[in-house]
Image (cartoon, grey):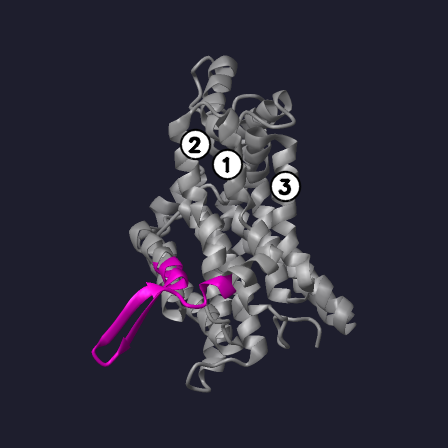
């Protein structure tokens, strides 16, 4: 299983969607079937413990409720007229339905196995960031010019989701260092903090605001929780002071960060003056306005997740007379509100927070940080509306749920 998780991480980060889908399919296949070879006798069929796994799955409501995003699209198909787009949304959300049972059916990962997966994530992310950084240096002036026009530094996959994984990798590196983890050699204990510090510096160079904001918020919430548990207020105060001062210092020292901030400020001014329809941030704000308008016109059940794209196009055509390219609402919350109404949004939030609080899994500082990263990304990103986002969310959520049952003693748990 750990090997499949390695493949999952690599294919996710480098947008190898076929390999990513294959790794998910194999996880499901392993949950349903088994192959036994005893000399010349070969048996292939349904897994003998399938009924027990079904009972275990049903008894842990967190694994069931994590499937809510799939069922929101499925049920809203009753009032969605665009069958093609509905099927596309169901395909994207299908992992929410099948992967929870797959994880329940697999043997529970040991603490060392989970740490090994996180270690692999940190190392792969470090290699990816070295590649991105070398490409940036090789095209320094051209890339900085792109940043000044609202374009991102090129990354192996979607730059926003890439930055979200990068933020979680930094938190994971801190957890590995706290645990004193090493895979084989003791010198790896120093490799982990060096890689983590590199990633922390690089996320400021990458300057994707979504990743930076959720990283700082995750550190903030974890620090507050840590201070409450340990009463080490001076240490936490120093961390919070660093969170305030670092962006200021980074603005002075890192050209890409300075370019991004200057562009964001200028773009916002264009939006406020009503002249920003051709700029990235302004387009984002306009898409959110459209999503809010659609939701407010259909506040209870929404227009149907399958009809959201069609409705967005209609509103853009009406409001901008075809002069603006339609953009889906740049917020997961607004997309769900517009597609399935306030009822769907409330169900979605319940399904999101239930795994965190059920069986007090919020005691895991790492699991808490992961949920902070995902939750705050929902405000400005459609995080789980593509394969990358769905894969990242389910990887962190299901890995945490499977490991934290029952909650163990570690940095993952604040109950020391």
Q: Residue at x 60, y 49 (%)?
A: 375
Q: Which quarter of the figure is the C terminus placed in?
A: bottom right
Within the magenta stretch, is there residue 37?
Answer: yes
The residue that label 3 is drawn on is 347
Residue pushed farthest bottom? 186
Residue density around tag 1, few if under 14, some if 14–19, many if 20 or more, within 10 Å: many
Q: Position of residue 70 (x, y in %)?
A: 50, 42
Q: Which quarter of the figure is the N terminus placed in?
A: bottom left
Q: Which mark is residue 73?
A: 1
Within the magenta stretch, is there residue 257?
Answer: no
Q: Which mark is residue 86?
A: 2
How far apart marks 1 and 2 lie (CA) works out to 7 Å
Residue density around tag 2, few if under 14, some if 14–19, many if 20 or more, within 10 Å: many
The reply to whether callout 1 and callout 2 are in contact (CB within 8 Å) is yes
Which range of residues does the magenta coloring cover? Answer: 26-53
Numbered disc 2: secondary structure: helix
Numbered disc 1: secondary structure: helix
What is the number of callouts on the image?
3
* Left or right: 385 as drawn, with respect to 235: left
Q: Residue at x 49, y 16 (%)?
A: 320
Q: Position of residue 275 (x, y in %)?
A: 52, 22
Q: Position of residue 257 (x, y in %)?
A: 50, 50
| Residue 246 seen in render | no
């Amino acid at each position: 299983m750990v090997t499949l998780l390695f493949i999952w991480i690599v294919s996710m980060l480098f947008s190898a969607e076929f390999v990513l889908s294959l790794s998910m399919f194999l996880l499901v296949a392993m949950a349903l079937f088994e192959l036994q070879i005893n000399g010349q006798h070969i048996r292939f069929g349904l897994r003998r413990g399938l009924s027990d796994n079904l009972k275990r799955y049903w008894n842990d409501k967190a694994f069931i409720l994590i499937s809510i995003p799939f069922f929101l699209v499925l049920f809203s198909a009753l009032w969605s007229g665009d069958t093609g787009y509905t099927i596309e949304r169901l395909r994207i959300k299908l992992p929410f339905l099948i992967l929870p049972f797959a994880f329940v059916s697999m043997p529970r990962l040991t603490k060392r196995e989970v740490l090994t997966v996180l270690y692999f994530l940190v190392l792969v992310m470090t290699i990816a960031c070295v590649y991105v950084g070398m490409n940036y240096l090789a095209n320094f002036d051209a890339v900085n010019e792109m940043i000044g026009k609202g374009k991102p530094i090129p990354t192996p996959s979607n730059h926003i989701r890439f930055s979200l994984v990068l933020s979680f990798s930094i938190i994971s590196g801190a957890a590995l260092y706290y645990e004193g983890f090493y895979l084989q050699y003791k010198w790896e204990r120093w490799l982990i903090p060096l890689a983590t510090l590199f990633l922390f510096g690089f996320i400021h160079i990458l300057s994707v605001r979504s990743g930076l904001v959720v990283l700082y918020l995750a550190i903030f919430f974890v620090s507050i929780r840590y201070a409450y548990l340990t009463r080490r207020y001076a240490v936490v105060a120093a961390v919070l002071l660093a969170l305030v001062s670092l962006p200021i210092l980074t603005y002075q020292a890192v050209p890409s960060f300075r370019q991004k901030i200057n562009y964001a400020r200028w773009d916002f001014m264009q939006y406020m003056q009503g002249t920003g329809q051709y700029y990235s941030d302004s387009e984002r704000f306009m898409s959110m306005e459209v999503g809010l308008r659609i939701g407010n016109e259909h506040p209870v059940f929404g227009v149907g997740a399958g009809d959201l794209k069609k409705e967005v196009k209609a509103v853009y055509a009406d409001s901008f007379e075809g002069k603006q390219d339609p953009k889906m609402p740049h917020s997961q919350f607004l997309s769900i509100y517009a597609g399935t109404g306030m009822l769907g949004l409330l169900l979605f939030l319940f399904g999101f927070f239930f795994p965190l609080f059920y069986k007090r899994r919020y005691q895991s500082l790492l699991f808490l940080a992961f949920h902070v990263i995902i939750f705050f990304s929902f405000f400005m990103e459609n995080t789980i509306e593509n394969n990358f986002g769905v894969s990242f969310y389910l990887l962190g959520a299901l890995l945490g749920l499977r490991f934290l049952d029952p909650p163990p003693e570690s940095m993952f748990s604040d109950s020391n």
